[in-house]
Image: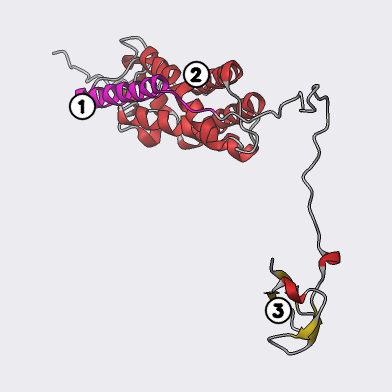
């Protein structure tokens, strides 16, 4: 078995045959005399002993815990692709038809996409060394996380109206930035609490859901704020018919002169 040797002069590393063990010779590079280590200097690493209870044959009773990674089955993949496809088709149909999606329809899409996107994001951003959650515990934790993810869009609607905006298209850029910051704060907090992700991983976890749902809304022509609205007075999301008369400025009447 070759013996590894390091020259103390030039620090060159090379191997020599075990028949030279304990003998001296010149370094092939700097010619400085070196001594080849012998068997007494060899370091032997022994395998760890099996501690713990053993059976009558001396074999360990306790078995090591094996890490089990989550892999989505065919049904879960088909459901995720189906929900995404239906959402994209519905968004394109609404955009091409010129129909403003109702608030309940947008809420339904936000809820339907929450768990698939939450699961996809968790699969990508979880710590591989820890293995992640599986089974019922994964379902419960991601279900809680997905519920809060979907709720963030409800908070967007409510806080936007709290600012005095009768329609979302009237939300200016500053207000939208504040609302998005609130949404990300909620998403990051629930991701850290339920999925035990790091801060950066939690940010990306919620960003997957936020970006996907935002793109779908813009694809459907939903005017979420002034930067995405052509005419704020035309986006009457969540308002009853006839509310547009309140928003439109009244035209001054032309005086008539009676003879």
Q: Residues within 10 Å of mark 3 (few under 14, many from 20)?
A: few
Q: Earlier in the sequence, mark 3 or mark 1?
A: 3
Number of numbered discs present? 3
Residue 71 belongs to the span the image colors magenta: yes
Q: Position of residue 251 (x, y in %)?
A: 27, 22
Q: Secondary structure at mark 1?
A: helix
The residue most toward the bottom is 31
Residue holding disc 2: 154
Q: Secondary structure at mark 3?
A: loop
The residue drawn where x is 36% and y is 14% is 105
Is the C terminus in the top left, top right, bottom left or bottom right quadrant?
top left
Q: Position of residue 19 (x, y in %)?
A: 74, 74
Q: What is the magenta range?
A: 70-98
Q: Tell me the CA gap for discs 2 and 3.
A: 67 Å
Residue 12 belongs to the span the image colors magenta: no
Can residue 175 be seen in this snapshot?
Answer: no
Q: Position of residue 225 (x, y in %)?
A: 41, 30
**Would you identify the image quadrant in which residue 93 lies?**
top left
Q: Position of residue 128 (x, y in %)?
A: 60, 38
Q: Of discs 3 and 1, which sits in the foreground?
A: 3
Q: Tell me the CA gap for discs 1 and 2.
A: 26 Å
Above-or-below relation of 33 to 83: below
The tag on residue 12 is 3
Residue holding disc 1: 96
Can residue 234 be seen in this snapshot?
Answer: yes
Q: Residues within 10 Å of mark 1 (few under 14, many from 20)?
A: few
Q: Residues within 10 Å of mark 2 (few under 14, many from 20)?
A: some
The residue most toward the right is 40
Q: Tell me the CA gap for discs 3 and 1.
A: 72 Å
Decide which of 23, 61 is in the foreground and name it. 23
Q: Of discs 2 and 3, which sits in the foreground?
A: 3
Q: Are marks 1 and 2 in contact (CB under 8 Å)?
A: no
């Amino acid at each position: 078995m070759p013996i590894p040797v390091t020259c103390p002069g030039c620090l060159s590393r090379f191997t020599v045959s075990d028949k030279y063990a304990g003998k001296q010779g010149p370094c092939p590079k700097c010619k400085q005399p070196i001594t080849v280590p012998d068997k007494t200097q060899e370091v032997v690493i022994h395998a760890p002993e099996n501690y713990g209870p053993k059976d009558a044959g001396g074999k360990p009773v306790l078995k090591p815990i094996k890490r089990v990674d989550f892999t989505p089955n065919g049904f879960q993949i088909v459901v995720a692709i189906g929900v995404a496809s239906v959402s994209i088709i519905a968004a394109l149909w609404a955009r091409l038809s010129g129909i403003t999606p109702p608030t309940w329809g947008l809420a339904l899409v936000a809820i339907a996409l929450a768990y698939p996107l939450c699961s996809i994001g968790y699969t990508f951003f979880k710590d591989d060394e820890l293995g992640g959650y599986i089974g019922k515990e994964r379902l419960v934790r991601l279900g809680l996380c997905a519920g809060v993810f979907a709720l963030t869009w409800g908070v967007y609607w409510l806080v936007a109206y709290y600012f005095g905006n009768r329609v979302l298209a009237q939300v200016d850029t500053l207000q939208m930035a504040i609302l998005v910051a609130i949404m990300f704060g909620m998403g990051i907090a629930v991701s850290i609490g339920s999925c035990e992700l790091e801060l950066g991983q939690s940010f990306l976890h919620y960003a997957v859901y936020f970006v996907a749902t935002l793109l779908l809304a813009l694809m459907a022509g939903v005017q979420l704020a002034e930067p995405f609205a052509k005419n704020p007075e035309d986006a009457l999301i969540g308002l009853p018919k006839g509310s547009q008369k309140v928003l439109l400025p009244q035209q001054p009447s032309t005086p008539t002169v009676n003879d």
